[in-house]
């Protein structure tokens, strides 16, 4: 992690850290609903609350960004 912090500082980027156990894949990045039925093999899913279609990795990346900015 020190290497990543160094690279961020070198390139004038901000390094933000979120908790190790922060859930990032199951919450909908659009409405916040947690999809408890999501499994590791599910790569794409549709939020049952707001009908937003998600790619698992992109949704997680958005949630990581939102969590780091909220901290």
Image (cartoon, rainbow, N blue to C red):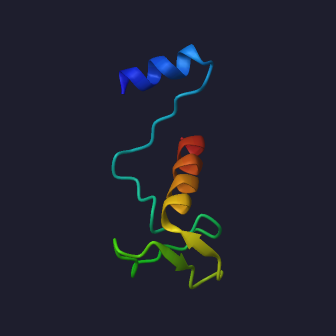
The one nearer the camera, 66 or 39, is 39
Residue 28 rendering spot, x and y as whole percentages: 56, 69
Task: Tally the marks.
Answer: 0
**Residue lying farthest to the top in this orientation:** 10
Picture residue at 54% right of the left edge, 55% below the top: 63
Residue 27 rendering spot, x and y as whole percentages: 50, 67
**Position above or below: 20 against 2:** below
Quadrant for residue 19, please give it.
Answer: top left
The one nearer the camera, 33 or 55, is 55
Q: Where the N terminus falls, by quadrant?
A: top left
The one nearer the camera, 70 or 9, is 9
* Residue 41 left/right relative to 13: left
**Position above or below: 71 against 50:** above
Picture residue at 59% right of the left edge, 64% below the top: 29
Residue 37 rendering spot, x and y as whole percentages: 39, 82
Residue 13 rendering spot, x and y as whole percentages: 61, 24
The one nearer the camera, 68 or 38, is 38
Quadrant for residue 2, please give it.
Answer: top left
**Position above or below: 4 against 55:** above
**Position above or below: 59 against 11:** below
Picture residue at 65% right of the left edge, 80% below the top: 50
Picture residue at 45% right of the left edge, 63% below the top: 25
């Amino acid at each position: 992690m020190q290497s990543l912090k160094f690279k961020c500082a070198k390139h004038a980027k901000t390094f933000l850290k979120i908790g190790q156990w922060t859930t990032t894949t199951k919450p909908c990045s659009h409405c916040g609903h947690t999809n408890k039925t999501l499994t590791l093999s599910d790569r794409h899913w549709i939020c049952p609350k707001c009908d937003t279609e998600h790619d698992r990795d992109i949704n997680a990346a958005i949630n990581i960004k939102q969590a780091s900015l909220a901290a």
